[in-house]
Amino acid sequence: MLGSGDGSPVDTLRLMTQVLVLNGPNLGRLGARQPEIYGSQTYEDLVTTCRTEAEALDLRVDVRQTDDEAQLIAWLHESVDTGAHVVLNPAAFTHYSYATRDACAMVTDAGLVLVEVHVSNPAAREEFRHTSVVSGVATGTIAGFGLDSYRLALRAVAAKVTG
Ligand code: DQA
């Protein structure tokens, strides 16, 4: 039953926009991994940053990380099935995983927002990082702002969803 339905003063249902924040391989090692490139903030800081920003934007967020390509693809399928928007840091999969790209295309083809994010700015790094096979099917990309990339991505989802 939705709400109390008995005429009591507060009988409202708020449908919140759902966002999956998905992180690919090695991002669980943030803080310890090449801090000169990725900064000193940890994956736990990333989770807190996303939850705090989502609350301020009235978004319902679920933050996850995996080193497994199949798991990441299963989560992208889940977003299509549940109608959740996606903030995705594909990490190294960005540069070569056509399977990840194809799953991302299903998300945006379903009319959902998918923002590709990066902590660093791959365009300013080694040549192999200049190619993203994901960008062409993403709604947009935000890179180079550390954990603020995630805050900006969540704002982009909120702006896009509210029109
Ligand atoms: C990254 C950039 C990728 O090139 C790299 O493989 C990562 C992290 C970033 O957030 O800056 O693992 O996606």
Image (spheres, rainbow, N blue to C red):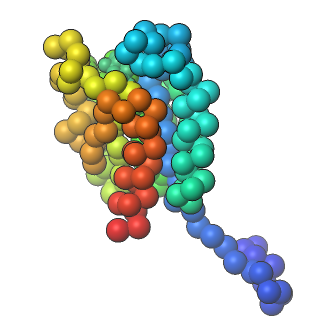
Q: What is the tally of numbered marks visible in this picture?
A: 0
Vertical order, 66 against 127 (above or below): below
Residue 37 in sight in this render: yes
Of residues 10 and 49, the one nearer the viewer is 49
Of residues 106 and 56, the one nearer the viewer is 56
Residue 99 location (% of width, % of height): 31, 27
Residue located at (72% from left, 74% from top): 2
Where's ligand 1: which quadrant? Answer: top left
- Compared across the picture, whether 149 is left or right of 57 comes to left
- Where the C terminus falls, by quadrant? bottom left
Residue located at (35% from left, 60% from top): 160
- Where the N terminus falls, by quadrant? bottom right
Vertical order, 101 against 81 (above or below): above
Residue 15 location (% of width, % of height): 59, 67
Vertical order, 147 against 17 (above or below): above
Residue 79 location (% of width, % of height): 47, 46
Q: Quarter of the image holding residue 4?
A: bottom right
Vertical order, 13 against 142 (above or below): below
Q: Quarter of the image holding residue 111?
A: bottom left
Residue located at (61% from left, 27% from top): 44
Instruction: Identify the residue at the far bottom of this view.
Output: 7
Residue 67 in sight in this render: no
Residue located at (32% from left, 30% from top): 144
Residue 34 location (% of width, % of height): 43, 9
